[in-house]
Amino acid sequence: MTATQVHVRRDDLSKVDLVEVPQAPLAEGAVRLEIESFSVTANNVTYAVVGEMVGYWNFFPAPEGWGIVPMWGHAKVVESNCPDIGVGERVYGYLPMATHLDVVPGNVSAHGFVDMTAYRQPLPPIYNQYARLAADPEHDPAREGERMIYGPLFKTGFLIDYFMNANDWFGAGRVVLTSASSKTAMGLASVAKQNSPDISRVGLTSAGNVAFVQSTGLYDEVLAYGDVGSLAQAPSVSVDFAGNPNLLRSIHETLGENLKYSCLVGVTHVVERAGGMGADGVPGPTPTLFFAPDHAVALFKELGPQEASKRMAAAWVGFLDAVAGTISIERSTGLEAARAAYLETLAGQVDPSRGIVIEP
C-alpha cells in the first residue's frame, strides 16, 4: 500500500513533486484517514512562506529540504486501531496535501478528538484538533466547500477583531486592510461590520480587483494600491495580509502619526515579500505579527469554550450571508490538480471570485 504526497522545496516554493510513499502497518491506537477534499487558498501559501519561522513544515514530515503544505479539509476513516473511532466515519481538520494521513486520537468526545502523534505535540494545539462530522455543530453538508475555503480564514478575522476590540482599536476609528480580496481580509471586514460597526473599513487591493472588492459590500471604501497616498488622515490601524514591504511602507508614510497600530497577518504578495515580512525600518508603530493560534487560546480562556464558540458561530452565519454568491467553487480531482492550484496561487494568479477545492 502506498500514499501519494505533494512535496515542496522549502528553499524554492515553486519546486513541487508528487511522491509515492509506502504506508507502514497502522500503529496501535491509530487511525488511517483517506483525504476526501481540501481547499487551496492564499492561506496555504502563507503556511509555506512562513513555514520555517512559525513551524508549519513540522506538522507533516517530509524528506530533508522538502515540506508538505498543510490544508484544511475532510477525510474518511479507512482503517482503525482505535476502539472509539470506527471505519467509515468522516472528520474535518488539518490535513497534508496528500491522499492519506495517520493520526492517534486522544481526548475523544462525540464532537472530535486531538491527534496525539508524538511529533505534533510541541505544535499549536488548535491545529491538532479534528471534528467528527456526525456530531459537529459547525458541519453543514451543503456548505462543506465554503467551510474549507473560508472557515479557518474567517476565524483568523474573528480573532483579529476580538483583539482589536479588547484594545479599543488602539484609539482608532478606521481599519485599513491590504489584500482586501483575500478570504481572511473579507472575514475580518465582515466581523468588524457586525461587531465593531463604529470602525470604518478601508480595503486596499490591486486595480484589477477593485470592482470585485466593492461588490462584496464589506468595505466602506476601496482603493487600488496605487492610490494609497490618497488615504484621508484619520486615526487608523492597519492589518497587512499582503506582506509587501513597499506597500506597508507606503501606508506607514502616508498615515504617519495617525497610524496607531500595524498588524501583520499574511503574505499574499510572495514575490514582493523579498525574504521579509516588511517590518524593518518603517516609520511609526512597529509592525507586529498576529499569530492566530495564540489568540485563539486566549479567547477560549477568557470567554470559555461555550461562549467563544457561540460568538464565533453567530459571526460565521453573518459572514456566509455576506459572501453568498461572491465566489464560484471549482472542484478538481487528483493531486496533480492540487499541485497546479498551489502553483497558481503561489504566483498570485487566482481570481478572488474562484474558490478551489481538490478531491485527491
Image: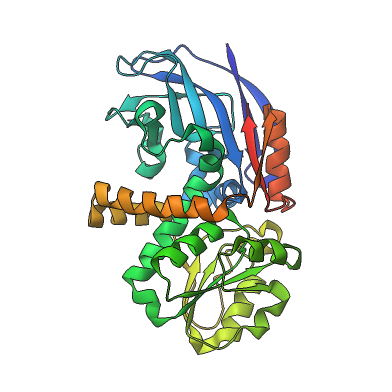
Rendered location of residue 97, percent (x, y): 59, 33
Residue under the point 30% across and 56% down: 299
Q: Is residue 130 above or below residue 247?
A: above
Q: Is residue 53 above or below residue 73?
A: below
Q: How many marks?
A: 0
Image quadrant in which you'd find residue 166: bottom left
Residue under the point 57% across and 64% down: 277
Rendered location of residue 55, percent (x, y): 47, 46
Could you tell whether 92 is left or right of 219 in the image? Answer: left
Which quarter shows the N terminus?
top right
Say if residue 106 shows up in the picture: yes
Residue under the point 56% across and 26% down: 36
Could you tell whether 97 is left or right of 172 in the image? Answer: right
Nearer to the camera, 87 or 187: 187
Residue under the point 71% across and 53% down: 348
Could you tell whether 164 is left or right of 327 in the image? Answer: left
Rendered location of residue 135, percent (x, y): 34, 29
Q: Is residue 161 above or below residue 102?
A: below
Say if residue 64 shows up in the picture: no
Which quarter shows the C terminus?
top right
Nearer to the camera, 144 or 155: 144
Rendered location of residue 111, percent (x, y): 32, 31
